[in-house]
Amino acid sequence: MPPAAETSRQLPAETAEQPALIHALVLLAIFGCVALAVSIVIADFVVPDHDWIADTISDLGAGRYEFIVDIGLYAFSAALIGLAVLAAHVHLGAWDWSVGIIALIVFGLLVFLIGARNEYGDNDNEGWVIHTYLVYALGAAMTVACFSLARGSARVSPVYRTVFIAAGIVWSASAPLFFFLPTDIDGIYERFLGAVSFVLVLTLAHLFYQRAKQLKANRCSRM
């Protein structure tokens, strides 16, 4: 059957990127990073006998004050999912960009599950303990996201491609070392890895922010 003729009651045949949506999700991405960082700092002071150099962030996510870091993890998870929505809304590549979208979704879900399962920092050995497997998968998702989004991001600026590739290399080289480090520096090293993941999120947020500015400028020039 031939397609129905477009009428005033139907949606227009062409769709367009929405700067307001982009700005909202960019703010969510920034908020997620800030919320996680602030929750960790607060928990560092609130949790008794916590050594931020030797003790991991996971240690803060168990026990009486677990809700503090959990809130930050949930906000960071929402930031990653929001960026995945943005990457689908503003699709900048071919198959590899699509893989990056899926990697962001998986990354966000894994962060949420890590916060929700509460299997860390308390020597939990009962039932099916999957924290370690979630961490392995998270590491893989971060790596895939960095490299998969690199080529498409170059369509906005080659600087973004360089940042994503550099972050992917640093992450893939340093994340596995965490499991072989002496326990007296686990905490500070895990915070370093967290900062690398922030590079991915904030770089994507900046990319989409610039895209929204470009869209608004183009629309103004056509008026």
Image (spheres, rainbow, N blue to C red):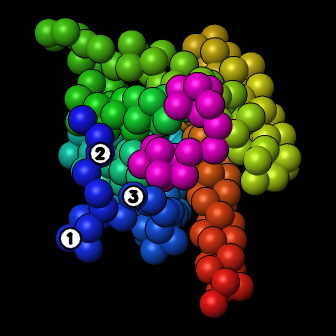
| Residue named by callout 3 | 13
Q: How crowded is mark 3: few (under 14 residues within 10 Å), some or many (20 or more)?
A: few
- The quarter holding residue 9 reads bottom left
- Residue shown at the point (29%, 57%) measured from the top left: 5
The amino acid type found where label 1 is placed reads Arg
Magenta stretch, residue numbers: 83-99
**Which residue is at the front of the view, 167 or 150?**
150
Q: Report the mark closest to the observer, 1 or 2.
A: 2
List x then y, in percent, for residue 150.
72, 36
Label 2: how many Cα within 10 Å (few below 14, some 14–19, many 20+): few
Residue 96 to residue 53: above or below? above
Q: Is residue 85 magenta?
A: yes
Position of residue 109 in the picture relative to residue 196 (left or right): left
Q: Residue 3 carries which label?
A: 2
Kind of residue indicated by mark 3: Ala
The residue sitting at 63% across, 15% down in the picture is 176
Q: Nearer the viewer, residue 206 or 85?
A: 85
- Mark yes or no: residue 213 visible: no
